Amino acid sequence: MRMKVPKMPVRDYFDLVRELRTDPRFHLSNQDLVGGFVRFRSEERLRLLTEILDFHNYGMTPPSTIKKKANMSKKMKDLGFNREAWVSSLEAVRGPDSNNFYQARCPSCARKGGDSGKDHLVYTLEGVIHCFKGCNFFSIIEGYYKEVKN
Protein backbone atom coordinates (compact mmCIF):
# COMPACT_ATOMS: atom_id res chain seq x y z
CA MET A 1 0.00 0.00 0.00
CA ARG A 2 1.37 3.40 -1.01
CA MET A 3 1.42 6.20 1.47
CA LYS A 4 0.38 9.71 0.45
CA VAL A 5 2.85 12.43 1.39
CA PRO A 6 2.43 16.21 1.38
CA LYS A 7 3.69 17.86 -1.78
CA MET A 8 3.57 21.26 -3.44
CA PRO A 9 4.46 22.63 -6.87
CA VAL A 10 7.98 24.03 -7.13
CA ARG A 11 6.61 27.50 -7.98
CA ASP A 12 4.57 27.57 -4.75
CA TYR A 13 7.60 26.35 -2.81
CA PHE A 14 9.68 29.24 -4.19
CA ASP A 15 6.98 31.73 -3.19
CA LEU A 16 6.85 30.39 0.37
CA VAL A 17 10.61 30.22 1.00
CA ARG A 18 11.67 33.42 -0.78
CA GLU A 19 12.63 35.18 2.47
CA LEU A 20 14.22 32.03 3.93
CA ARG A 21 16.72 31.54 1.12
CA THR A 22 19.73 32.41 3.33
CA ASP A 23 19.19 29.09 5.13
CA PRO A 24 20.57 26.24 2.98
CA ARG A 25 17.95 23.84 4.38
CA PHE A 26 15.40 25.58 2.16
CA HIS A 27 17.46 25.56 -1.07
CA LEU A 28 15.81 23.63 -3.86
CA SER A 29 18.92 21.46 -4.24
CA ASN A 30 18.23 20.09 -0.75
CA GLN A 31 14.62 19.11 -1.48
CA ASP A 32 13.00 15.92 -2.73
CA LEU A 33 11.78 16.80 -6.24
CA VAL A 34 9.54 14.49 -8.26
CA GLY A 35 7.69 15.59 -11.38
CA GLY A 36 7.78 19.32 -10.61
CA PHE A 37 6.66 18.86 -7.00
CA VAL A 38 8.56 19.21 -3.74
CA ARG A 39 7.66 16.21 -1.58
CA PHE A 40 7.91 15.99 2.20
CA ARG A 41 8.45 12.27 2.86
CA SER A 42 10.20 12.05 6.24
CA GLU A 43 9.65 13.45 9.73
CA GLU A 44 12.48 15.89 9.17
CA ARG A 45 10.91 17.07 5.89
CA LEU A 46 7.50 17.39 7.59
CA ARG A 47 9.10 19.60 10.28
CA LEU A 48 10.60 21.68 7.48
CA LEU A 49 7.14 22.04 5.89
CA THR A 50 5.70 23.10 9.27
CA GLU A 51 8.44 25.74 9.63
CA ILE A 52 7.74 27.04 6.11
CA LEU A 53 4.00 27.28 6.78
CA ASP A 54 4.50 28.91 10.20
CA PHE A 55 6.77 31.49 8.59
CA HIS A 56 4.34 32.14 5.75
CA ASN A 57 1.17 32.25 7.89
CA TYR A 58 2.43 33.82 11.14
CA GLY A 59 5.80 35.38 10.30
CA MET A 60 7.59 33.07 12.75
CA THR A 61 11.18 32.70 11.52
CA PRO A 62 12.44 29.14 12.08
CA PRO A 63 14.87 28.92 15.04
CA SER A 64 17.55 27.31 12.91
CA THR A 65 17.36 30.18 10.41
CA ILE A 66 17.71 32.74 13.18
CA LYS A 67 20.79 30.91 14.45
CA LYS A 68 22.31 30.79 10.98
CA LYS A 69 21.78 34.52 10.46
CA ALA A 70 23.29 35.43 13.82
CA ASN A 71 26.99 35.60 14.29
CA MET A 72 26.64 38.11 17.06
CA SER A 73 29.30 37.26 19.63
CA LYS A 74 32.07 39.15 17.82
CA LYS A 75 29.72 42.02 17.02
CA MET A 76 28.66 42.25 20.68
CA LYS A 77 32.25 42.13 21.91
CA ASP A 78 33.23 44.93 19.52
CA LEU A 79 30.28 47.01 20.72
CA GLY A 80 31.04 46.47 24.39
CA PHE A 81 27.58 44.95 24.78
CA ASN A 82 26.72 44.15 28.42
CA ARG A 83 24.61 41.03 27.89
CA GLU A 84 24.13 40.21 31.58
CA ALA A 85 22.70 43.65 32.34
CA TRP A 86 20.52 43.49 29.22
CA VAL A 87 19.13 40.04 30.10
CA SER A 88 18.39 41.12 33.68
CA SER A 89 16.41 44.09 32.32
CA LEU A 90 14.09 41.94 30.18
CA GLU A 91 10.46 41.38 31.16
CA ALA A 92 8.66 38.02 31.32
CA VAL A 93 11.63 35.81 30.45
CA ARG A 94 10.70 32.19 29.74
CA GLY A 95 12.80 29.26 28.63
CA PRO A 96 15.00 27.90 27.38
CA ASP A 97 12.98 25.86 24.89
CA SER A 98 14.16 22.76 23.03
CA ASN A 99 16.28 24.95 20.72
CA ASN A 100 17.91 26.79 23.67
CA PHE A 101 15.93 29.96 22.95
CA TYR A 102 14.61 32.16 25.72
CA GLN A 103 11.49 34.23 25.07
CA ALA A 104 10.71 37.65 26.53
CA ARG A 105 9.07 41.00 25.90
CA CYS A 106 10.94 42.96 23.22
CA PRO A 107 12.27 46.20 24.79
CA SER A 108 12.03 48.03 21.46
CA CYS A 109 8.39 47.01 20.95
CA ALA A 110 7.65 47.85 24.60
CA ARG A 111 9.02 51.40 24.15
CA LYS A 112 6.49 51.82 21.32
CA GLY A 113 3.67 50.44 23.48
CA GLY A 114 3.63 47.03 21.79
CA ASP A 115 4.29 43.39 22.67
CA SER A 116 1.56 43.13 25.27
CA GLY A 117 1.77 39.33 24.87
CA LYS A 118 5.43 39.52 25.94
CA ASP A 119 6.55 37.07 23.28
CA HIS A 120 8.11 39.01 20.39
CA LEU A 121 11.73 38.57 21.49
CA VAL A 122 13.82 35.40 21.42
CA TYR A 123 17.48 35.16 22.37
CA THR A 124 20.13 32.61 23.23
CA LEU A 125 23.03 32.79 25.64
CA GLU A 126 25.34 32.46 22.62
CA GLY A 127 24.25 35.89 21.40
CA VAL A 128 21.36 35.33 19.00
CA ILE A 129 18.80 38.13 19.42
CA HIS A 130 15.68 38.34 17.25
CA CYS A 131 12.34 40.16 17.36
CA PHE A 132 9.50 38.52 15.43
CA LYS A 133 8.05 41.97 14.63
CA GLY A 134 11.26 43.00 12.88
CA CYS A 135 12.89 45.39 15.37
CA ASN A 136 16.54 45.89 14.49
CA PHE A 137 19.34 44.61 16.68
CA PHE A 138 20.48 48.03 17.91
CA SER A 139 16.99 49.17 18.93
CA ILE A 140 16.56 45.94 20.93
CA ILE A 141 19.83 46.35 22.88
CA GLU A 142 19.61 50.15 23.15
CA GLY A 143 21.38 51.48 26.24
CA TYR A 144 23.49 48.37 26.79
CA TYR A 145 26.36 49.03 24.38
CA LYS A 146 28.93 51.77 23.84
CA GLU A 147 27.96 54.28 21.15
CA VAL A 148 30.73 54.72 18.59
CA LYS A 149 31.65 58.40 18.25
CA ASN A 150 32.84 59.56 14.81
Image: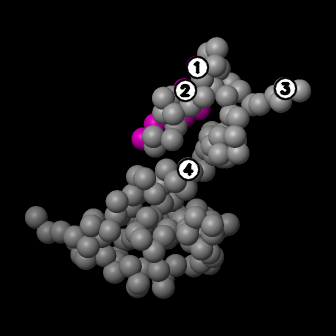
Identify the mark at residue 14; answer none if there is no mark.
Answer: 2
Q: Name the magenta segment's main secondary structure.
A: helix
Disc with the residue nearer the chain's start (3 vs 4): 3
**For mark 3, what is the residue?**
2
From the viewer's side, name the closer residue of 111 and 6: 6
Residue plotted at (49% across, 50% down): 65
Disc 4 on helix, strand or loop?
Answer: loop
* Part of the protein shown in magenta: 10-22
The amino acid on which the numbered mark 4 sits, given as a three-letter code, is Thr
**For mark 4, what is the residue?**
61
Mark 1 Cα shell of 10 Å, populated few (<14), some (14-19), many (≥20) = few
Identify the mark at residue 11; answer none if there is no mark.
Answer: 1
Identify the mark at residue 57; answer none if there is no mark.
Answer: none
Q: Are marks 2 and 1 in contact (CB under 8 Å)?
A: yes
From the viewer's side, name the closer residue of 20 and 38: 38
Q: Nearer the viewer, mark 3 or mark 4?
A: 3
Mark 4 Cα shell of 10 Å, populated few (<14), some (14-19), many (≥20) = some
Q: Nearer the viewer, mark 3 or mark 1?
A: 3
Q: How far apart are the two marked residues, 3 and 2, measured between alpha carbons?
A: 27 Å
The amino acid on which the numbered mark 3 sits, given as a three-letter code, is Arg
Disc with the residue nearer the chain's start (3 vs 2): 3
